[in-house]
Image: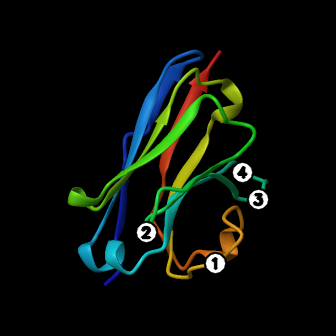
Amino acid sequence: QVQLVESGGGSVQAGGSLRLSCAASTYTYRSTFYMGWFRQVPGKEREGVAVKYIAGSSTYIADSVKGRFTISADSAKNTVYLQMNNLKPEDTAMYYCAAADRSALQWYQPKNYRYWGLGTQVTVSS
C-alpha cells in the first residue's frame, strides 16, 4: 500500500525557516520517478512548489520560492525534504507530499501525481 507521511509543518514568523519531511514506504519510493511538494490555500488550486526526480539529480522549483526553498532526498530513508528559508506570509498553506510513477510529466501539474499525503500546515505570520 502506498504511504506518504508528511511532518515538519508549523507556525513561524516571517523570515524564519522550516523543514518538511515526506517519508514513503519502500515500495512507493522504489516505484516513484518524481516526488515532491505542492501547496494549497482555501479557494485556490493546488500548486507545485518543488519536485525531485528520484531516479536522478534533477529538481524543479517554482519561481515563487526559488532561492528560498530547496528539495533534497535521502534514499536510505525513503524520504524527501523541503527546506524552507526566509518564509513569507504568502507561503502560508497546507503542504502536500506527492509521488508520481510516470517517467515523463509536467512536474507542476497535480493531476500527474498518483499518490498523496494528508498534508501538513505551514503558517507564516508577519
Q: Secondary structure at mark 4?
A: loop
Q: Are marks 4 and 2 in contact (CB under 8 Å)?
A: no
Q: Secondary structure at mark 1?
A: loop
The reply, left or right, for residue 67 in relation to residue 19 is right
Q: Which residue is mark 4?
A: 42
- Which of the two residues, 79 or 57, is positioned nearer the viewer here? 57
Q: Which residue is mark 1?
A: 104
**Upstream in sequence: badge 4 or badge 2:** 4
Q: Residue at x 67, y 75 (%)?
A: 105
**Upstream in sequence: badge 4 or badge 1:** 4
Q: Residue furthest left?
A: 76
Query: What's under tag 3, amino acid-wise?
Result: Glu
Mark 3 or 4: the one toward you: 3
- Rounded to the nearest angstrom, the CA distance separating label 3 from label 2 is 28 Å
Q: How many marks?
A: 4
Residue 10: tell me if it is visible.
yes
Mark 3 or 1: the one toward you: 1
On the image, the x and y values in percent for residue 43 come to 78, 54
Q: Are marks 3 and 1 in contact (CB under 8 Å)?
A: no
The reply, left or right, for residue 65 in relation to residue 12 is right
Q: Residue at x 38, y 81 (%)?
A: 31
Residue 98: tell me if it is visible.
no
Q: Which residue is mark 3?
A: 45
The reply, left or right, for residue 84 in relation to residue 79 is right
Q: Secondary structure at mark 3?
A: loop
- Rounded to the nearest angstrom, the CA distance separating label 4 from label 2 is 33 Å
Q: Which residue is mark 2?
A: 55
Q: Are marks 3 and 2 in contact (CB under 8 Å)?
A: no
**Upstream in sequence: badge 3 or badge 1:** 3
